[in-house]
Amino acid sequence: METVTILVDVQNVYYTCRSAYKRNFDYNKFWAQATKNRKVIKAFAYAIDSGDEKQAQFQNILRAIGFEVKLKPYIQRSDGSAKGDWDVGITLDAIEYAEQSDIVILVSGDGDFAILVDKMVHKFNCHVEAYGVPKLTALSLINAATQFYPIESQLLM
């Protein structure tokens, strides 16, 4: 049985699905597709914690599906801008689990991950599947991945 590690950039998938389709990503359908006939080594959902009750309920749903939810506080800067991305955390976990997994699944359209994906494929000989909204996923990430799965109607709710 193939082993898999799943890394979900929650903010990225939320905003790209909302922008492209005005719909939400269906984590249950995704989980069923991504884990079919596979053993899950680790599954992380990386999110920003703004202290919102609805968001906390959503995070509990992710936990019930099988994700370990990693949270970072939402940081509002004095100039009005905000910070709260998980790029470094996702990268560290990807490197840590690439050697333990036959497949790493990255759910994000962020082109910054193309270098990471290329490294996992070539250095760790790891199969990398990327999921993203096609028109909002960086071509560099699509090209770096071993396989790209478009987030379209079948993965939306």
Image: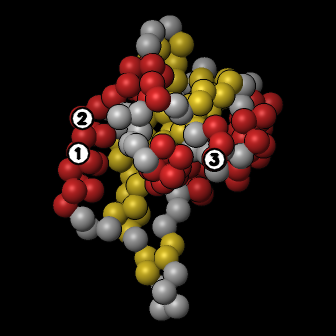
Q: Is residue 74 visible?
A: yes
Q: Which residue is mark 2?
A: 64
Nearer to us of marks 3 and 1 is: 3
Reading the image, the residue beneath label 3 is 136
Identify which amino acid the numbered label 2 is placed on: Ala
Residue shown at 23% from the left, 45% from the top: 60
Q: Mark 2 falls on what kind of element?
A: helix
Point 39% across, 20% down: residue: 32
Side of 123 where 76 appears, left or right: left
Q: Is residue 148 above or below residue 56?
A: above
Quadrant position of residue 50:
bottom left
Name the image quarter holding residue 142. top right
The reply to whether the C-beta atoms of the residues labelled 1 and 2 are less than 8 Å apart is: yes
Name the residue: 52% across, 91% down.
79
Few, some or many residues within 10 Å of mark 1 (<14, 14–19, 20+): some
Label 2, label 3: how many angstroms apart (C-alpha)? 28 Å
Q: Residue at x 64, y 38 (%)?
A: 134
Check disc 3 and give the amino acid type. Leu
Crowding at dot 2, Cα within 10 Å, few <14 / some 14-19 / many 20+, comes out as few
Residue type for callout 1: Asn
Q: In this figure, which residue is indicated by the disc labeled 1?
A: 60
Q: Is residue 135 above or below residue 6?
A: below
Whichever of labels 3 and 1 marks the residue nearer the N terminus, that label is 1
Q: Earlier along the polypeptide chain: callout 2 or callout 3?
A: 2
Secondary element type, mark 3: helix
Left/right of residue 119 with respect to residue 64 in the rendered view: right
